[in-house]
Image: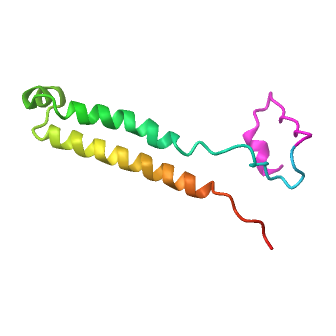
Amino acid sequence: MTANEGLIAANRTAAPRDAGAPASGQADTGNTRAPWWQPGVYCSAPAVFLWIASRLPEPMLAQMFRGDAMPLVLNQLGDALFFCGWVISAILLWGSRRQPPAA
């Protein structure tokens, strides 16, 4: 039994290897770029929502979330979400950079 057999369902077979794929097992990344921007964009939308929600009247927020310091908490959550999303995007961009050929 190999390590990959646990990932394949009993009623499904493994997909056949692509005939055009390189023999070394590494994918050809010449024409494809990693979607490095997605974490930043997808974390920005909820962050903007949290920033807008933090500007709602304080009594309304206290009633909805049952807390006294909710504007500050929502604002800080929005900041953290925005920051983490773009840091992940930066890491993905850095990790997908093209390496010079080995000498």
How many marks are shown on the rendered structure? 0
Q: Main secondary structure of the magenta part?
A: loop
Q: In the picture provided, is 73 more to the left or to the right than 90? A: left
Residue at 48 percent across and 42 percent down: it is 39
Give the percent coordinates (x, y) of residue 74: 23, 39
The picture places residue 45, in percent across and down from the top left corner, at: 38, 33
Among all residues in the image, which is located at the extreme right? 19
Q: Position of residue 85 (x, y in %)?
A: 43, 46
Q: Is residue 53 magenta?
A: no
* Residue 9 to residue 73: above or below: above
The question of residue 6 being in magenta is answered with yes
Judge by depth and name the residue closer to the eye, 96 or 8: 96
Residue at 30 percent of width and 31 percent of height = 49
Highlighted range, magenta = 1-20
Along the line of sight, the residue nearer the viewer: 33 or 71: 33
Residue at image location 63% in from the left, 45% down from the top: 34
Q: Residue at x 35, y 44 (%)?
A: 81
Q: Residue 100's x, y, as percent?
A: 72, 65
33 or 74: nearer the eye?
Answer: 33
